[in-house]
């Protein structure tokens, strides 16, 4: 999923994706479904408009018609597709914020998706399983937390010194209805992260360590839309990436990890680990061709117990540009113990095939 559209100095940007998902064996049952997603937005750079330097206004909307492969067919916990939404049909204002650069510092204020900046693993960006984008220790424990397809009103700041970047942000906890309590009176989620870039050998390593704390107030979030059973919970996450180039090929590897050390009733998904490899530009005369391999494993505890089981996803993904701004992306996933269920309640391992078509358009500013 794309990041802040203004970072690339565009005035207008659109993205469209259409995919079909088929559970070929195992899981709850075999079957197929489809999802379509459109995202479009506008960016206004204050410096280019002749006003003041370093400012940026961003507005972005999305519309999706989503299938539900996880609940209908696969029965998995992590989500085989990062396009799937909790609702069959959704159309909403996705982002609307102001960004200001102040030397080595940047501040953002408005309707923001925190996952554009926190808990991001760039090398894993082509993989479809949702865990590579934001860890299930967050999304599975805090339903409707502000991340795709939701954002929330909030503020964040970042500062850089050499190869080090520090970020912190505070966002309303309700991503479903971000304007219901615009000042966070229903609850807040806080993020903090430190990123460190380190040149090693022929490439560069990026190390990230962060944490989050979610606190909600009153019965609205806990009961009406089921954000959580506890007034507060928190956790930590980290990722390591290494990128290097051999001849014309760009290589990348990553390792992810996260934990939610709360009671099982509050955070049933207590641990996550992911790893993978990405190879880009390996087909002559096709510089955008990308092969990605990934493994994602999430542990889920049972209520009233510190023991549980794990779900593992193994994925292979290939992205091939067809012509300018258009690409095709087939994906295969093998899900071991879908749902991370304990003994006596397991679902057969699932084999899932996905084919995605994508289109990207932008107008330079």
Image (cartoon, rainbow, N blue to C red):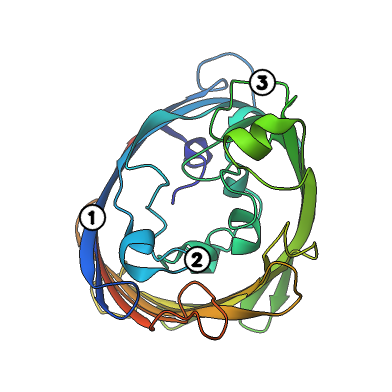
Q: In terms of depth relative to the viewer, which is nearer, 203 or 308?
A: 308
Q: Residues within 10 Å of mark 3 (few under 14, many from 20)?
A: some
User: Which residue sits at x=73%, y=56%?
Assistant: 266
Q: Residues within 10 Å of mark 2 (few under 14, many from 20)?
A: many
Q: In terms of secondary structure, where does tag 1 sit?
A: strand
Do tag 2 and tag 3 residues touch (Cβ < 8 Å)? no
Q: Which mark is residue 34?
A: 1
Query: Which residue was labeled with disc 2?
Result: 78
Residue 6 placement (x, y as % from top left) = 50, 35
User: Which residue sits at x=64%, y=37%?
Assistant: 223
Q: Is residue 14 visible?
A: no
Up the image or down, 290 lies above or below 140; here it is below
Q: In terms of depth relative to the viewer, which is nearer, 24 or 47?
A: 24
Q: In terms of depth relative to the viewer, which is nearer, 173 or 228?
A: 228
User: Which residue sits at x=60%, y=44%?
Assistant: 145
For marks 2 and 3, the one nearer the N-term is 2
Q: CA distance from mark 2 to mark 3?
A: 30 Å
Residue 9 placement (x, y as % from top left) = 47, 36
């Amino acid at each position: 999923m794309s990041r802040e559209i203004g970072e690339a100095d565009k005035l207008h940007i659109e993205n469209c994706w259409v995919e079909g998902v088929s559970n070929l064996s195992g899981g709850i049952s075999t079957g197929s479904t489809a999802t379509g997603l459109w995202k479009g937005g506008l960016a206004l750079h204050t410096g280019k408009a002749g006003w003041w330097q370093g400012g940026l206004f961003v507005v972005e909307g999305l519309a999706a018609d989503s299938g539900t492969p996880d609940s209908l067919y696969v029965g998995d916990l992590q989500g085989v597709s990062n396009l799937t939404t909790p609702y069959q049909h959704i159309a909403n204002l996705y982002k609307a914020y102001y960004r200001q650069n102040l030397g080595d510092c940047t501040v953002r204020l408005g309707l923001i998706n925190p996952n554009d900046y926190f808990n991001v693993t760039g090398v894993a960006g082509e993989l479809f399983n949702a865990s590579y984008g934001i860890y299930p220790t967050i999304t599975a424990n805090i339903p409707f937390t502000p991340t795709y397809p939701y954002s929330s009103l909030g503020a964040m700041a970042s500062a850089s010194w050499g190869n080090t970047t520090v970020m912190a942000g505070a966002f309303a906890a309700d991503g479903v209805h971000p304007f219901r309590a615009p000042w966070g009176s229903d609850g807040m989620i806080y993020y903090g992260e430190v990123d460190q870039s380190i040149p090693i050998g022929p490439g560069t390593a990026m190390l990230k360590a962060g944490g989050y704390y979610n606190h909600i107030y009153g019965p609205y979030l806990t009961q009406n839309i089921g954000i959580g059973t506890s007034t507060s919970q928190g956790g930590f996450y980290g990722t390591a990436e290494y990128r290097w180039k051999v001849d014309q090929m760009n290589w990348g590897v990553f390792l992810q990890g996260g934990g939610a050390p709360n009671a099982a009733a509050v955070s049933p998904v207590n641990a996550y680990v992911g790893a993978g490899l990405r190879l880009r530009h390996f087909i002559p005369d096709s510089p955008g061709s990308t092969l990605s391999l990934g493994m994602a494993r999430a542990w889920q505890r049972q209520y009233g117990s510190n023991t549980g089981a794990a779900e593992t996803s193994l994925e292979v993904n290939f992205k091939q540009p067809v012509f300018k701004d258009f690409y095709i992306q087939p994906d295969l996933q093998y899900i071991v113990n879908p749902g991370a269920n304990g003994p006596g309640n397991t679902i057969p391992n699932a084999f899932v095939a996905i084919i995605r078509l994508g289109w990207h358009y932008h107008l330079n500013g």
